[in-house]
Image (cartoon, rainbow, N blue to C red):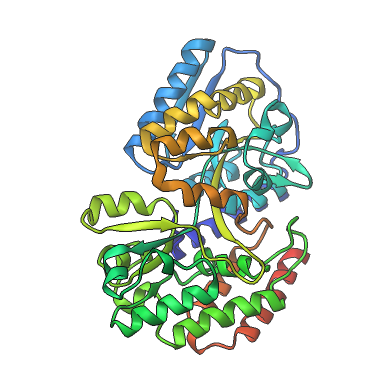
Amino acid sequence: MRTSHRVMAVAFLTTAMVAGASACGSGFNDTPEQKSGPADLEILIGSSGQAETDAVQKAAAAWAEATGNTATVVPAQDLAQQLGQAFAGSNPPDVFYVDAGRFADYAKAGALLPYGKDIPDADDFYASLRDAFTFDGELYCIPKDFSTIAMQINTDLWAQAGLTDDDVPTTWDELRSAAEKLKAANITPIVIGDTRDRIGAFMVQAGGWIVSKDGTEATGDSPENLQALQYMQGLIKDGLAVYPRDIDTGWGGEAFGKQLAAITFEGNWIKGALQNDFPDVKYEVHEMPAGPKGKGTLSFTVCWGISAKTQYREQAIDFVRHMTSAEQQIKFTEAFGVMPSRASLRDEYLKQFPNDEAFIAGAAYAQGPVKAPKMDSVLSDFDAGLQQLASTDPKALLERLQDNTEAALAG
């Protein structure tokens, strides 16, 4: 779930491949001849590890046995690159994971089958997740699971600074106040990732974002976004917040695990990292502090995409129904700890993972990734600016973001 520049570069290549294939008449928008079956589905996934691979393969085998079809699940070495090559070669898998950040490019290119209308209980999936996979007003694909950003607090460092449960910040002002007390105790208060995937949560809390809800208008240069960047810049300049690289670490979870800072903002993937690498760290998870316009966080999700070129549409849709059923989502949760994308499973999930309530709560007000095509280079440029936020004019940074976004949307 952590975004790297290498991933962004590959994603940009993928977008170019998809767009190029579409422009060259690859037939994405043509209806391929359908086969009645039995189907031989190829499924490409971007697995988080062996536990996820095993669980998906087991679920696919169960579906195949029950329906008389075949389903071959292949864990990609590099999902973005392999999908890009498959699309460019006009031989994509039937079903595949689609990251929300890449969705608009695939949808605009006509690479995806918009099958949302064929899922009778689609409304059971969190609205914010459905919105992430809606293009031109149509739900294209069903989210398989999700993560949100929440606030982690090191309880030992918290107590060392004389802070109590009453000091857990719920607003920006309270976050700054707690950070000042931590600094006074010679404790680095906050470590935060240096890209929009973390700082963007504060933009949402201020009421801003990079594009409009439908992804058609640039909204980067707004008073709300400026307020968020000025707030974050103030924390950095006053020594209340640092980037991971400033304390010789690769990401917020590593810095937090090494107890180099008392507060960080990460998704629920931090649980596994801390358990595996820093099992002795004591911490709590809370919702993100609210900003001037209320609560706000970011969500990260992947959907089950179906190729517009598949010759097994009905079977592929039935496969997705099986993989996203309530029963199967619970099995996935038990197997590799993901948060189910069905709102109806919230309570059952929290019975198993009561400490994840802050992550689940964020689903109600989370902002998904930028949902607009051809934005990879724009967002990479914005991230580069955020990485120099301490010495950059936030207004100039947002003006550049606005101009670049408008050019991308127009192009």
Q: Quadrant of residue 166?
A: bottom left
Q: Where in the figure is residue 75, as x and y percent of width and height?
A: 41, 37
> Which residue sits at x=22%, y=53%?
279
Q: Name the residue nearer the viewer: 195 or 8.
A: 195
Front one among 290 and 383: 290
Residue 19 visible in image: yes
Residue 409, image x, y percentages: 74, 64
**Residue 411 in view of the camera:** no
Residue 309's spot in the image, x, y percent?
A: 66, 32
| Marker count (numbered) | 0
115 w.r.t. 189: above or below: above
Q: Quadrant of the C terminus?
A: bottom right
Left of 385 or right of it: where is 48? left
Residue 329's place in the image compared with 258, above or below, is above
Q: Is residue 277 left or right of residue 174?
A: left
Residue at 78% from the left image edge and 47% from the top image edge: 136
Residue drawn at (56%, 65%) of the image: 201
Frontmost residue, 183 versus 35: 183
Asked if 271 appears above or below 353 in the picture, the reply is: below
Residue 106, position in %: x, y? 65, 47
Determine which quarter of the picture holds residue 398: bottom right
Of residue 66 and residue 204, the one placed in the foreground of this image is 204
